[in-house]
Image (cartoon, grey):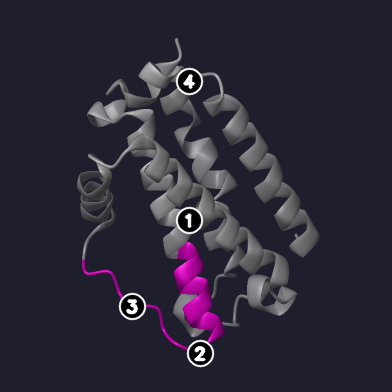
Amino acid sequence: MNQAELLAHVRSGRAQFESALAQFSADQWLAPDLHGGWSIKDLIAHIGFWEQHTAQEFSALLRGVKPPDDSLTLDELNAQVYVQNQHQPLAEVRLAEQVAYEQLLLLVENALEEDLFNPQRFAWTEGKPFAEWIENNTYGHYAEHRADWTMSNE
């Protein structure tokens, strides 16, 4: 994969994600119908957090700084994000996610191929290209949760 292909996957995944979300009514966005009692709004906050987190990690690595270690497990971090955003208005959650996505997309658009695809570029990635983080927190993440929002629309 190269940068153009990565961007095509990110944009295509995003288009599918937005198309799926466009099917829901305002009431469905707030109904706690997803796994664990989450709403679509909660899922959007979750996705936005991981987009922002990935952008921050990449920015730190590009500055030569090791990203801070998360002392929480993945489940604990996801639960914390849920609690922090549970009472946020839908419009704020959607805007924050959109900004996080655009920030991450801009970083990828302006990155060097070396920074994205060289598995040895950043010691922090332990022999994996940073592009894997981009995939896992954009189009891969959308696909991972596709069943959640599909289930909510049935």
Query: Image check: 129 left or right of 70?
Result: right
| Mark 4 / mark 3, whichever is N-terminal | 3
- Circle 4 Cα neighbour tier, 10 Å, few/some/many (<14 / 14–19 / ≥20): some
Q: Are marks 3 and 2 in contact (CB under 8 Å)?
A: no
Task: Report, in whole angstroms, how far the alpha carbon at label 2 lies from the one at label 4.
Answer: 41 Å
| Secondary structure type for disc 4 | helix
- Which quadrant holds the N terminus? bottom right
Q: Which residue is mark 1?
A: 51
- Whether 36 is drawn above or below 9: the answer is above
In front of the other: 121 or 63: 63
Mark 3 against mark 1, which lies toward the viewer? 1
Q: Amino acid at mark 2?
A: Gly
Q: Which mark is residue 150?
A: 4
The magenta segment? 54-71
Task: Report, in whole angstroms, how far the alpha carbon at label 1 lies from the one at label 2.
Answer: 20 Å
| Secondary structure type for disc 3 | loop
